[in-house]
Amino acid sequence: MRKAPFRIVAPLAVASLCVALSVPASGQLVLGQYENEAPLATWNVFGASTAAGLGLGGIRLSRAWDASVASTNPALLTALPRSSGSLTGAYVITALYRFSAVNTGVLSSASNFSTGYLALESGSFSYRFGDWAAAFTAGLLESYQRPGIDQSYSAQGLVRYALRLEQTGFLRGYTLALARRFGRRLSFGAGLNLVRGNLDRVLVEEWPVEGITIADTRAERFEGLFLNAGLHLALSRGLSASLAVRAPYSKKSDAESLLRYTASGGDTDIRIEAEARNSYRQPLVVGAGLDSRWSEAWSAAAEIAYFGWSRYEVRYFDEPLPRPFRDVITAAAGVEYSLKGRLGARPARFPIRLGLAYDPQPMDNAHSSYLSLAFGLGLRLGSLAADLGGRVGRESGSGNSLKTGRVALSVSWFSDDR
Amino acid sequence: MKRSPKRTAVIILPVALFLALVPALLEAAADPADIVSFDRRHFESRGLVRDGLDLLYEKDGRVYAVVTPEDIASLVSRGVAFTIETARLAPSAGRTASAAGGLNGAFHSAYELDTELRLLADAHPQLVRLQEIGTSLEGRPIQALKISDNPGLDEGEPAILFLGCHHAREWISVEIPLLLARHLLENYALDPEVRSLVDRGEIWIVPLVNPDGLEYSIHVYRYWRKNRRANSDGTFGVDLNRNYGYQWGYDNVGSSPVPGSAVYRGTAPFSEPETEAVRRLFLSRDFRAMVSFHSFSQLILYPWGYVDLPTGKEAELSTLAHTMSALMAAVRGAVYVPGRASAALYTTNGDTADWTFGVSGVPSFTVELPPEDTAGGGFFNAEAEIEAIFRENLPAMLYLTNYAFLSSPDGGIRPRLPGTLRRSPPRLPLIKRIDRDLPSAITMNQ
Ligand SMILES: [Zn+2]
């Protein structure tokens, strides 16, 4: 993941310039969507996403797009050609209003911030041998990046005060999956998942005239291991159903913290250092979907996924953090029309996709949810496929009309024509 | 710091060993209440939930509980490997395990304080009662310790109140009243002076008036001051030390009507649940004195704060403040400057001491703890300084407690200075400020 070069810092007003704009929530230590450990754009992350699935609103467990389905529903691997490989890149941009010290009392802004990233999100390959199939997927699952804040106050040509707030981080997932077909209709698959990542946060204040600096630095290195599994059942020639599960697991981190006050005048250097083993208990995810093909050209898919966030637990530097969360159910659905045509001399297909997604966030104190519209275009040319998908969402519930957007491009190779 | 080696009794049980081990274990756990820890997984898998153990807290995957000998026998019979932690955790001269580590180091978070108060209350049931006097805006308990010889009885004894941490970033102000509580409880049996005070009156200690603010200060922004009220204009926080009802909002100098201000007084006197909790407690008992701890500057301030005029008890308050200052200086030379709060550069209205004095006339003080200035750390204190700061405050607090318990409500008996005071009171500079803010003109909107 590259740190976004286009990081946008919306106009900030310090202190007295605060603008009365927000709709404050009741419990203020609970920031809502953007707790420090919150993934950018949505809490509801389930496996790697593909550009084709994105075009249908976010179909991830009911259609065998490519080998990255190992991280959502590995049963689908048996529906892929003998061998396949794919790469997905994405550009994500998201609006935030309230996070860390921003719009929680210290720094105020009149408008939302945006931040985003451009990244090679996932790479995967699969191989099928008879009724069995295996796959490996590596993907960027979560980003913890926040808009950077760099504020200073000057008087009479001297910087009197400066504040810098930075947070970066990501979580990568690696899935090794195995699937088997049982008869003509039923497939089952299971995957072993490893996640690794980091979260680094620093808040520095300086009073240069007095020679005083306060620095609050924290770093976490994540790791976690969990299982996922799925079923795929062909109900009829044009209709199939899928069921997928991600087991709950603890995302652990080795964490370090240093809180430091230095004043050069008094040779004062006060440090509070800590190390801890943090844990974030990730919820059970259960997804179900239907995939329907009406004709050679028309098809549709729909999914729901349950995220058991009410059991989300965080232990942070040896203390439980309050996270009043509720379970949520996300939904996505889309239709695809596949145009037949030629590219040069070769026959090709051009899928066109349209989708919708509903993505409620788990915070109990503000029932915030995103409603998104998705579109997609594809190309199937022999053993190659390329897909472009985009999705734009608008949030309601927080009072800040947060927006989010994602554009993804996938390129896949299959060992034979599909 | 004194840490005796922990007595470890790790038992993994073949049934045959069971009977042989039980007597030895019961002996090892002979104290009526021991603290043990065991793996959290045992807590869930071996039915310990149903046992109704007196659970204290969980740390590093281990559950800590207060157990009786019967509980220990029960743990043994279930094959639970446990460690006796009493010696390691018992409150003693050092910092306790419940506050060790974490983002705030040896200082207590709201969670750590709750744990520590329960430990103290469990360890000294004959001397202390833990009482929740209110709930913060975000739902955290505001806890008070009542320390007295028969804490469960209402004996109508005179009382004194020690308050800590109205202002979130003043972490040291939690520690001093908490250490005072520990000192009283641990030295009751050893120290006749402590015993006399605890027997004669009620010592009420509320170490953390502003738990929500403290948590924000630990987790988000170190220099947060107010509580976490979501104000109507999108700003946050009411200055709890401007929200009390005596001459509340007297002028816009000693407090501010602007919600974004660091000294925002709130929409009404006692509009905040945190100050309301203190109000209810104070009016419910026969309090004869009050100390509210703050930092920094090393000051001992007494009413009035809202206007630069002496109270009708100026002489008494001044004498008390000077005496306490002298007692503090006698410990290691740190000068806490005594003075009338309003004699500083600016006045304060709606603060705790004006209200307790205003409604009851009892000696009321704001003690601004070290350091003296921003060069010395501002709202930061080194972890290693906590104990020393407590030690230099202790004689003054004991002196004031004794004074309060001797005095009748209308002011009668005057105790003599304790014999430990050998120095003459130091010469004192003028008070420069109260509860100073950020060291420049800028204040973030808090
Ligand atoms: Zn204060």
Image (spheres, rainbow, N blue to C red):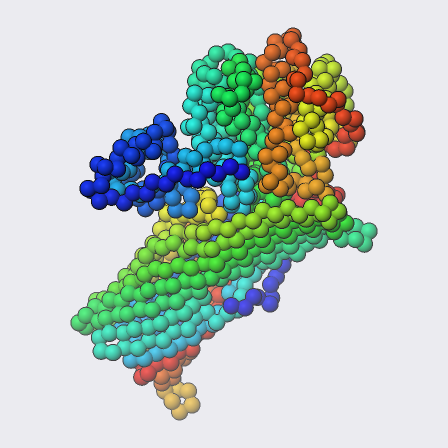
Q: Which residue is drawn at the image coordinates 46% and 45% (left, top)?
A: A318
Q: Depth check: A165 or A349 in front?
A: A165
Residue drawn 58% across and 46% down?
A: A272
Q: Is residue B276 visible?
A: no
- Assign the C terminus of chain B to one quadrant of the image: top right
Which residue is found at the position 56% from the left and 27% from the top?
A: B180
Q: Is residue B233 above or below residue A151?
A: above
Q: Is residue B332 left or right of residue A339?
A: right
Q: In the visual, does A63 lie left or right of B120?
A: left
Q: Residue at x 50, y 30 (%)?
A: B142
Visible residue check, residue A379: yes
Please state which of residues B52 and A142 is positioned toward the viewer in this rendering. Answer: B52
Residue B168 against residue A293 in the figure, above or below: above
Nearest the eye: B446 or A341: B446
| Figure disc tally | 0
Horizontal side of residue B179 vs A48, given as left or right: right
Q: Quadrant of residue B351?
A: top right
